[in-house]
Image (tube, grey):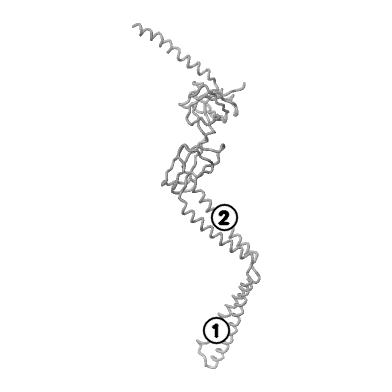
Amino acid sequence: MTRKIFLQAIVLPLAMLAPTLLEGCQKDQGPYAGSGTIELREARLGAQVPGLVLLVRAEEGDSIQPGDTLVVLDTLARAIQRDQARAAAMAARASWEQTSRGSRVEDIGQALAQKEVARAQLAGAQDNFQRIQGLAAQGAATPAQLELARTQLASSQAQLKALESTADRLVKGSRVEEIARARAQWEQSEAALRAAQDLLDRSIVRAPMGAHGRWILTERLVEPGEMVQPGGQVLTLADPHRAELRIYLGEQAVAQVRVGAKALVHLDSDTATAIEAVVANVSRSAEFTPKNIQTAGERAKLVYAVTLRVTNSGNLKSGMPAMARIEVVP
């Protein structure tokens, strides 16, 4: 009986004092203080082209350097397209160079020789047609023989005309318009080659440049054999040197807070150590107090989010609970 009275004498005063102590702690934090969880700045990497995942070259927790190959998609079809585009570009360049330089002496000589042969053949066809025509007038040649001679004559005339045109073009060289057209075709094929190469490069997901040159892989969302679509997230990287803490302040308090203001952050796991921070962003619109956030002004229905950039020497991790107090100069 005496023990029960003794416990009541201790517990009841403490219970009555608890609200007063809690209120005192909240007042000690002040209107410019709040709590939240540490979050590292993240980069969510996605696929830029559709394809089958062949390789994933990193595990969660790995240290990643900018430019590291992280995910490789099936590249066979895109490699074939790139090779076809390269062959077409090489052929277009050769055609442009040939058009620009003009014809070789050997080609010109050969064309002139072919023209002379065609001229001799035409002369023979003319003599043969005249002979058959005379015989037909005397009844010594049939109409079929005369028609055949006329056909051979017309063919010889057409062949000579074509060879004369070819020889003249080789002697004079390509026109300015032809050279320009050949160059345009080459440039177009080079552009197609660059597009095919770019598409092939996008089949590989690489780590981007970071502000501090290193990332930590926090989420691996795909495995070899899975299909991905453009825009589908495959990995999440976190910048271990870029930590943020979001707290919520009431309207009167946030009116005194400016971007760039200094703050001190205390981890729940190490309340004795103060970590320097600065205000990086102050929300322009109010919102209802999140249920998982404890603020100084508990009676305020609307609060403003304040993001702090916390100095991270490498020991801060995402999800660590912490409390921050902003230094406001009157």
Q: Which residue is mark 2?
A: 191
> Circle 2: is it few (<14), some (14-19), or many (20+) Cα within 10 Å?
some
Amino acid tagged 1: Arg
Residue sitting at 54 percent across and 91 percent down?
135
Disc 2 residue type? Answer: Ala
**Circles 1 and 2: CB distance less than 8 Å?**
no
Name the quadrant of the C terminus: top right
Which residue is nearer to you in this view: 19 or 46? 46
Point out the residue furthest to the top here: 2
Q: Please give the residue where the numbered disc 1 appears in the rendered image.
A: 150
Q: Is residue 86 above or below residue 247?
A: below
In this rendered view, identify the residue nearer to me: 91 or 138: 91
| Left or right of 169, for residue 228 | left
Q: Secondary structure at mark 1?
A: helix
Q: Quadrant of the N terminus?
A: top left
SS class, disc 2: helix
Q: Nearer the viewer, residue 254 or 61?
A: 61
Which residue lies at the image location 46% right of the left edge and 48% below the top edge? 73
